[in-house]
Amino acid sequence: MKRVLVTGATGFIGRHTLAPLAAKGFEVHALAGPGEAPVFEKVLWHDADLLDAGQTQALVQKVSPSHLLHLAWHTDPADYRASTKNRLWVDAGLELARAFVGAGGRRAVFAGSCFEYGPVDGPCHEIKTPCQPDTLYGQGKHELFCRLAADLKPKDMALAWARLFFVYGPCESPEKLIPTVINNLMQGRPAPLTGGGELADYLFVEDAALALIEILDGKVTGPINVASGKPLTIRQIAEEINRQMGAAGCLKFGEYPLPPAQKILADTTRLSKELGWKPATGFEEGVAKAIEFWLSTAGNNIRQIQ
């Protein structure tokens, strides 16, 4: 029996992993966020504070998972890049990994981030590109990866570190780029943007979830970029949203200065060749689904899993 523990299971990406994991034959155990009451068939829900080492140990001992998908982290758009809470999640990740190994866990996938690379102006390769994170978030993620690699011997468990690039789609935080543009246009307001020349790799959330599951159920270890491999400029992204919404003249390019890194691109060779995986959702289709979501959920609580 493959038994997986999913942390961050009610989050943006986590909620999209549950049904596919069950479909793959996993017995799915999921950790709900504080105050959340998710409803989802074929999932066994648990309540624990991962920042409390005792609760983490008790949870893992109770579930006794063979697999672990660790997505939980501090991700509040208002402060996650500079929050000191990143430090707490480094320690929490170490405690979780040690508890998992102690309970006989065999394979784990931890969610990393493209922010580990820092302000790289060009393609990011898992081995060739040095990690020089310039945010507390990126530093915390990379420190956890390094400490896991150093503290846990290969024989203890198989560890894959999924470096997620930019993920978008239903249930994304409204403060992020794509929801911001959609909601501004939806409400008849102009959408202020940078000049639009920056390049970024955006992956639809359901594809990101499926990639994580393929990694979890496979044999790849070490860092692996999770991205589409097809970067777009911010102008292309905004103009596609604008085209689908028919809001001509509402994009205000040049309102904000360009960020330090203007080309955050993923080398997806490991993902495509070693794992044999590629995204199923094109950007136009993904944007259409995102627009449909925001049109249908305006004013509703988007965090409830149906």
Image: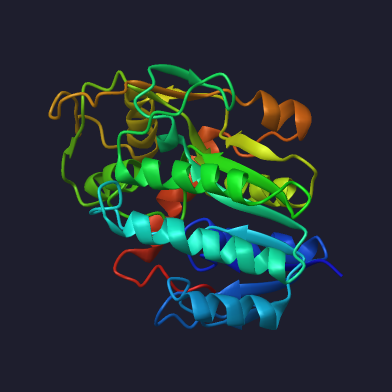
Q: Is residue 259 left or right of residue 89?
A: left
**For the point 52% across and 83% down, which residue is it?**
47
Q: How is the image coloured?
A: rainbow
Q: Quadrant of the N terminus?
A: bottom right
Vertical position of residue 117 compared to residue 82: above or below: above
> Percent position (x, y) of residue 294?
37, 56
Vertical position of residue 19 compared to residue 291: above or below: below
Q: Quadrant of the C terminus?
A: bottom right
Number of on-image labels: 0
> Percent position (x, y) of residue 235?
32, 24
Name the foreground residue: 82 vs 91.
91
Name the foreground residue: 33 vs 292.
33
> Percent position (x, y) of residue 172?
40, 54
Q: Is residue 178 left or right of residue 4?
A: left
> Percent position (x, y) of residue 277?
73, 35
Q: Using the rendered view, name the quadrant where residue 228 is placed.
A: top right
- Furthest residue to the right? 1
Name the foreground residue: 46 vs 254.
46
Name the foreground residue: 61 vs 272.
61
Q: Is residue 221 visible?
A: yes
**For the point 27% across and 22% down, which residue is it?**
196
**For the point 79% across and 46% down, which residue is it?**
218
**For the point 37% across and 29% down, which residue is it?**
118
Q: Is residue 73 visible?
A: no
